[in-house]
Image (cartoon, helix red, strand yellow):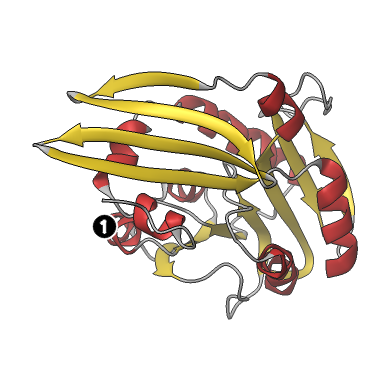
Amino acid sequence: MAAETTTWYKSWFDTRFYHILYRDRDATEAQVFMDNLTQYLNLPEGGSILDLACGKGRHSRYLNKLGYDVTGIDLSVNSIAHAKQFENHRLKFELHDMCRPYPKQFDAVFNLFTSFGYFDRDEDNLNTIKAVKADLNATGFGVIDFMNTDFVLANLVPEDTKTVDGITFNLKRFLRDGYIIKTIDFETNGQAYSFEERVKAFTLADFEMMFEAAGVYLLDVFGDYKLRKFDAETSERLVMIFK
C-alpha cells in the first residue's frame, strides 16, 4: 500500500497506524504549551479559538477545559469522527480545508505541531495564512507552531526503527526538493505498508515573506513551548505570533 504523492497527508493521517506510531507524544508538554500560550496572548475569558489541523483534538479538548470556546478542523475523516465524541456546547469538530477561511471569526487561530507546509503548491501555504487572517477578529492573534528547520536538518537521524504494538516501523529521513521527508515502512498481519511524510523546509525568513504577502504582521517569535527566545541554531521549535 503506497501513499499517494500529492495527498500523502490524507492517506497517512487517516490510518490507525499514524496514531500508533505517534502514541507517545507528550500530552503534558502540549498542555504546558497551551497554558503558556493562552496566558501570553491574554485571550479574553471564555474567548474563541480555532484549532487548524486539529487531528484527534488533544489541543482542542485541553483548551476547552481551560474555558475557551473551541472549534477544531481537520481533513482527516477518521480523526474528526473520533474527536466528535468529545463535543459539547463549547467544543466542536468539523471537516474543513485550512486553505479556505472558516465561516466565523475568532480571538485566536492556532496551527500547532508542524501542521503546515504539507502542500505541493506554494500558493496553498500562502492561502492558509490568508485564511488565518480572514478567520481572526479585529483583536485576534494567529499562531503557527512549526519545526525549526535549521535545527532539524543539523540533527537529522537518517534512519532508525521504532516498535509499537508489535509493529516495527522502519523510518528514513532526508531532504529532497526543498522538503524534509520521512518514509515509514512496515509489515503487519502479512501485509506491507509504505507511507511518506513531506513537509516544506520553511525557515523564519520564508515565513516572513509569506506573512508580508498575506498582509499579516509578525509580532513575536519563540523557540520552544516555554516561550523562550528563538535561536536558529539551538531552538527546537519556531513559534510565530502574528495578526
Task: Examine the image and state in which quarter residue 189 appears.
Answer: top left
Disc 1 is placed on an element classified as helix
- In this picture, residue 161 sits left or right of residue 219: left
In which quadrant is the C terminus drawn?
bottom right
Q: Residue furthest left?
A: 189
**229 horizontally vs 188: left or right:** right
Q: Nearer the viewer, residue 186 or 141?
A: 186
Residue 236 seen by the camera: no
| Relative image position of residue 89 (x, y in whole percent) | 39, 66
Amino acid type, mark 1: Gln
User: Disc count in the image?
Assistant: 1
Q: Look at mark 1 in the image and give the residue it sits on.
A: 85
Task: Provide residue 24's location: percent of width, then percent of height.
Answer: 37, 26
Give left or right: position of 135 versus 52: right
Q: Is residue 95 above or below residue 201?
A: below
From the viewer's perspective, tell me whether residue 82 is left or right of residue 26: left
209 or 104: which is nearer to us?
Answer: 209
Q: Residue at x 77, y 45 (%)?
A: 240
Residue depicted at 72% across the width and 74% down the height: 134
Residue 26, percent across and down?
45, 26
Q: Is 20 drawn above or below residue 102 in the view shown?
A: above
Residue extending farthest bottom: 103
**Can the viewer see residue 184 in this picture?**
yes
Residue 144's x, y, as percent? 69, 49
Quadrant position of residue 228 = top right
**At x 69% / y 27%, what residue is drawn?**
153
Neighbour tally class for label 1: few under 14, some 14-19, many 20 plus, Cα within 10 Å = few
